Image (tube, rainbow, N blue to C red):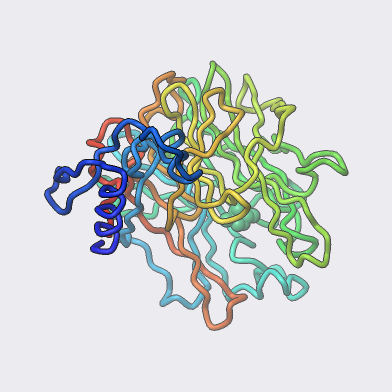
Amino acid sequence: MKRLAAILIGISGAAGWSLAEDVSGAFPFLIPPEKPGRPLSAAVERAYDEYGGFRPESNELFTEFKYTELKGFDYNGGDATVSRRDPSKVIFANGKYYVWYTGRKTPVKPAGMSRAHLATDEVPSADWDLADIWYATSTDGFTWEEQGIAVPRPPKPQPGWRSVTTTDILEWEGKYYLYYQAFMEASGTRGDFCPVAVSYADSPDGPWTPHGKIVIPNGAPGEWDQFSIHDPYPLVHDGKIYLYYKADFDKRPELKPSKVRMQGLAIADNPLGPFKKHPLNPVINSGHETTLFPFKEGVAALVIKDGMERNTIQYAEDWVNFEIASMVELMPVAAGPFVPDAFTGTKDGRGITWGLAHFVNAADDWRTNYSILTRFDCDLSLDLDDQEMKGHFK
Ligand code: AAL
C-alpha cells in the first residue's frame, strides 16, 4: 500500500494533480482532474476513457469476494465419498432460503474422470458422477439444514439415469422448475457429455415431477454445443425464459482435455420448451459455470475460471452482446447467487451481495475430488454504499 501511495504521489507531482483524503482517512488518493493538455500514454488515456474514475471501486461491476465456511454440512471426514457442488441460485420462499445442488454419497470415492473405464454402478468416475439433486434450507444463509434429495436419478433409460447434476431453479407463474444436466453415461467416457432435463413442482419443497424429456438438446454434429449442454441458468427477461448455458467443444484429443468453453443462450415462452438457441451463440467467449443476474436494464455475468476473458465481470445491455465491465480476482467458483429479481422481469436489476459457491478438494490423489459448498459475499449491488465491499487497497 505504501508503494502504491508513493507511486500515486509521484504521478500527481508530474501531472499537477491534487491529493485529497480518502473517505476512510486511510491514505491520500488522487482526484482525477480534467485530462491534461499534453500527450498521454495509451495506459493513462485508457484510465480516462474506459475506467473513468481511476479506482476500480468506482466501477459498479467491480467487487472483491469474501468467503465464509458454512455450518450444517457433513463431509464424512473428507474421504471423498460425500460431495456437494454446483449450487443453484439461492431463492427466498416460505420465510427461508433454499438452495439445490449436486449431491454425491457413494460407497467409494471417484476413480477420477480420466479413469472413467474404472466406473461401475457403485464406483463414480467424476466427482459429479452417480449424483442426485439435493436441497437445503437456511434462515440466515450461513447455517444450512440438508432436507434430502429433491430430484433422484431416474431409472434407466430415462434422461439422467447415470447422474443428475448442476441444477438451477426457475420460478414461473407460481410453479418451480429445476433444470439439470442429465447424464446417460459416466462422465469421462467420451468427454463430459450430456444434455439438459427439467423437473417441476408447485412448491420448492417438492414433490418434483420429472418432465421425462430432454429440454435443451445437444447441437447437431459440427455445432459448438454438440457434446455438452452444461450449467443451465434460467432468468426471466422480456416475458420469456432466458436460459444461459455452457458447452465445451474443442475435443481434439491432443488437448487432453480441451478447456475451450463458452456460454450460449436459449430462449423459451414456456419452461418446458421449446427453447430456441440464439443465432449469435456462443454469447460469452470464456468462463466455466454460468452465473448471471439482472443489472439495470441489462444482465451481468461472472466469467470464471476458463478462457481468455476469465476473471472478468461482463455486461450486456441487450442480454446478448457482452462486454468486459471489470477485472476481478478470487471469483466464486460455480457461484449460485441470491438474485432477488431473477424472475421478476425487471428492467432495473439491482445486483447481488451474496450466494453459495463450491471449492473442489483433492482427496489423496488429485483425480479423486470431492467438493464443499461455501458462502461468498460481494458488492455487486446498486443498493449498497459504493465503498462497502468493493475493496480497499490491501
Ligand atoms: C462443473 C460444471 C458441470 C460440469 C462439471 C459438473 O463445475 O461445469 O457440472 O459437467 O463441472
Left/right of residue 21 with respect to residue 39 in the rendered view: left
Considering only vertical position in the picture, is 243 above or below 124?
above
Q: Look at the image and tell me whether residue 31 can be seen.
A: yes
Picture quarter with the N terminus? bottom left
Q: Where residue 128 sits: x, y (%)?
A: 60, 61
Most extreme residue toward the left is 25
Q: In the image, what residue occupies the spot 27% across and 31% down? A: 383
Total numbered badges shown on the rendered structure: 0
Where is residue 6? Give x, y as percent: 25, 59
Instruction: Answer with the quarter of the image where residue 279 lies.
Output: top right
- Vertical placement of residue 367 versus 209, above or below: below
User: Which image quadrant shows ligand 1?
Assistant: bottom right
Q: Which residue lies furthest to the top in this view?
A: 239
Q: Which residue is drawn at 87% across and 43% down?
A: 222
x then y, percent, for residue 126: 64, 66
Q: In this view, does 176 lie above or below 348?
A: below
Q: Which of 30 and 96 is in front in this view?
A: 30
At a point 71% along the width and 25% down the height, the residue shown is: 274
Residue 339 in view in this figure: no
User: What is the quadrant of the C terminus in the image?
Assistant: bottom left
- In percent of width and height, residue 109 lies at 58, 75
- Residue at 40% from the left image edge and 27% from the top image edge: 341
Question: Residue most toward the bottom?
Answer: 364
Q: Which sits in the foreground, 297 or 309?
A: 309
State the residue lying farthest toward the front: 38
